[in-house]
Image (cartoon, rainbow, N blue to C red):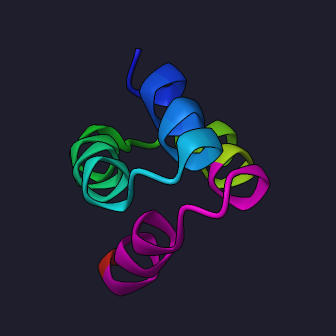
């Protein structure tokens, strides 16, 4: 669901909501979904999520 919202925020350029979605998704990343999340973030320019992932490793 957060992925769907993130796609819409990217499409309609709602930056503050996009940031909120990225922060939420960051809290949900684990070893089982990390690769899928990384791929998704690259496709949808989720820069905050990518930076946060880099800081936790």
Where residue 11 sits: x, y (%)?
64, 41
Q: Residue at x 37, y 60 (%)?
A: 15
Give the position of the C terminus as an image quadrant: bottom left
The magenta span reads: 41-55
Where residue 27 sits: x, y (%)?
21, 47
Where residue 49 sits: x, y (%)?
43, 64
Seen from the viewer's position, the closer of residues 50 and 46 is 46
Is 38 placed above or below 36 here? below
Is 29 placed above or below 49 here? above
Q: Residue at x 52, y 53 (%)?
A: 13
Residue 32 visible in the picture:
no
In the shown orientation, is residue 45 left or right of residue 34? right
- Majority secondary structure of the magenta segment? helix
Give the position of the N terminus as an image quadrant: top left
Is 1 placed above or below 7 here? above
In the shown orientation, is residue 27 left or right of residue 9? left
Q: Residue at x 68, y 52 (%)?
A: 44
Residue pushed farthest top?
1
Q: Is residue 51 magenta?
A: yes
């Amino acid at each position: 669901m957060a992925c769907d919202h993130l796609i819409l925020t990217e499409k309609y350029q709602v930056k503050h909501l996009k940031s909120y979605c990225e922060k939420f998704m960051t809290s949900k990343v684990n070893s089982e979904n990390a690769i899928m999340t990384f791929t998704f973030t690259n496709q949808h320019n989720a820069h905050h999520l990518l930076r946060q992932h880099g800081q936790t490793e």
